[in-house]
Amino acid sequence: MENAKAAHIDELVRVSEGGDSRRDGIITDSWRRCVSDYKLDPTIRREAYILPNEHLRLHRDAMDEFLRMARFGLESLYHQVAGMGYVLLLTDHNGITVDFIGDPNIDDRLRRAGLYLGADWNEGRAGTCAVGTCIATGEALTVHQSDHFDTTHIPLTCTSAPIFHSGGELAAVLDISALRSPEPKISQYLALQLVRAYAHKIETASLYNNFRREWVVKLSASHEFAEVDPDFVLALDGGGRIIGFNSRAARLLASEEGGQGDGGQASAVPGGPDRSGLLGRCFSDFFDCQVDDLVRFVRSLPTDQRTIRLRRSGTPLFIQAMPPPAVLIPRPQAADEPQLPPPLRAVSGGDPALKAVLARAAKLVNTRMSLLIHGETGTGKEHFAKALHRSSVRAGKPFIAVNCAALPEALIESELFGYEPGSFTGATARGKKGLILEADGGTLFLDEIGDMPLSSQTRLLRVLAEREVTPIGRTKAVSVDVRVIAATHRNLVDLVKAGRFRDDLYFRLNGAVFTLPPLRQRGDLVWLIDRLLAERSRHDGVEYSIAAPALAALRAHSWPGNVRELVNALDYACAVCDDGTIDLADLPEPVQHSGAFDAWPAGDPPAADCSRHGEEEPAERLREVLRRRRWNVSAAARDLGVDRSTIHRQMRRYGIVAPHRQS
Ligand SMILES: Nc1ncnc2c1ncn2[C@@H]1O[C@H](COP(=O)(O)OP(=O)(O)OP(=O)(O)O)[C@@H](O)[C@H]1O
């Protein structure tokens, strides 16, 4: 053994003085650095150095989030090599071991060898070693037995790979080491491939984590792997500029710049990723694809047809583009907004027309006045009536809803007013209380009141005027305390004119008329989608989210069935989507096909979609996105999942002018 050490020192001295060596160049270069740069003396043995706990804590704290994220990668790798005598180390960019997994049965031996938490493997202190030399070169490598500079470490075999931050700086080193191993260095070849693969996984996971709110482009030579395990990953800002990359992407683009076009062989370019040149460069400088075309790739093109080419080498790559998730932020209540009772506040996300309706309704919740709600089918008339009821002092009493259009004319009176036992043919022996009396103390909601027969209207009028009901077959009236809220999608004035609706009933009802806007005019569609999905998530125990193209299609749809249609569309989408993410293809056909991508670029959105009170909200939203993206139209288009021409058209429509174009 002593002879072996002496021979090792001889070799070190000879090589560091410029002599030949059969070792890898990366090892002999490191030996020479150790002697000339770090002034290490090969004849002096240095034991492994373990940092005191308080110093180690500082190193760990500095990379807390990264450590949490990398831990899963470490554990999966350890699982792969369990029982083979390996220890896993994760060091920071200084070579300090900040995480470690090893066999606790040999804890003491590992600690003595420096294969332990807190060990310092910087090349300047430990000499040539896998971690230190990996830090010095940016390369993955194996430092096997006598490759080590310091004779203390000669028994070890250590293999390391670098993990880079998304901007190219070294973040950490992943190392897999063993106290003993077979003599030939080739025995560590698989360890080298494994450690490279896991370093790549951790690096890419960290990139996804850092750029959750930006475009992430995944590229691979194989379409099957482009989604699940891409080689090359880039993060782009809204303007299509590169704001992050994994090291394979950096190597690929660096080699493309150098004209070598290595076709994506990740390890072909020595020296680690290009740390300076990529950030801020345009995606389209490197690929034959304008960044605006990325939108196309998140749509329904089959994965095996989603290819782009590197501009210089022409190498084809399969692409997957992940748009930023839709930003669904509930609007905070402005300080000057009137305080609404919570059930009424929950009806709107800030649509101006609806806000005015709710503010007026809040003042009337506890009056005895009858109310009339007008609005297209599915606009939420009953929903609003319930919110009024829940906001009132009657909240603890019944809310009885009657659909006048669904009740047969012959039954409407007996259902509403009730009857005495045996008062008419077909009457039950026990009689019936009637819905109006059922609602005593509470609210009676008469849906589709325009369909109520004239005779019933007369009796209803009496209930409203005299606050009493006379059940069929009874002579004496029963007093009743109900708040009547009626609703209709019809024009009651036209019905009055046609003699089909009593004018005195109309006048009694129309003291307080609320008109609910159709969904296509509401400016709080995104809020409503968010709210409905949150409800659904709570109900199903699944966290639903919505992809930008799907959101764009929902925005572009004209919603003839109003909120009911939206509820149904989202129910359907939640049922068919995978992993809780609603994509364009998960929406019902009619919604998909009136989506922004199909309908808007060809022409303006339907004029009816933006009538007066609906306009403020989308205009403000568009202005906000443009401001956030510093008036970069392409970036705003990508955020909203539409194309640039749509944004320009919408800007003209709402009179929005970028500050640098204002005269
Ligand atoms: N603001 C809202 N928030 C959540 N869900 C809503 C909202 N408004 C309406 N809905 C839902 O939309 C659907 C239709 O609402 P509702 O039945 O109240 O409409 P309507 O105008 O009374 O319909 P119709 O005229 O056909 O009777 C219901 O499932 C309701 O729960």
Image: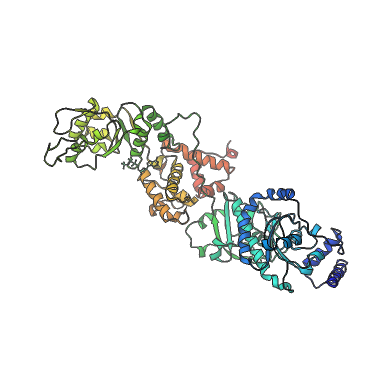
How many numbered circles does the render carry? Answer: 0
Residue 592 appears anywhere in the view: no
Return the residue nearer the eye: 218 or 24: 24
Residue 206, position as x, y percentages in the image:
62, 54
At horizontal 48% and vertical 63% (from top left) the residue drawn is: 302
At horizontal 36% and vertical 30% (from top left) the residue drawn is: 392
Residue 127, position as x, y percentages in the image:
80, 61
Residue 382, picture quadrant = top left
Left or right of 477 on screen, residue 634: right
Return the residue nearer the eye: 256 or 120: 120
At horizontal 49% and vertical 34% (from top left) the residue drawn is: 333
Residue 585, picture quadrant = bottom left
Left or right of 325 on screen, residue 612: left
Query: On the rendered image, what quadrant is the C terminus found in?
Result: top right
Colouring convention used in this rendered image of the protein: rainbow
Q: Quadrant of ligand 1?
A: top left
Query: On the rendered image, what quadrant is the N terminus found in?
Result: bottom right
Residue 37, position as x, y percentages in the image:
85, 58
| Residue farthest along the left direction in this orientation | 425
Residue 53 appears anywhere in the view: yes
Left or right of 67 on screen, residue 561: left
Image height of 337 relative to 410, above or below: above
Residue 299, position as x, y percentages in the image:
48, 57
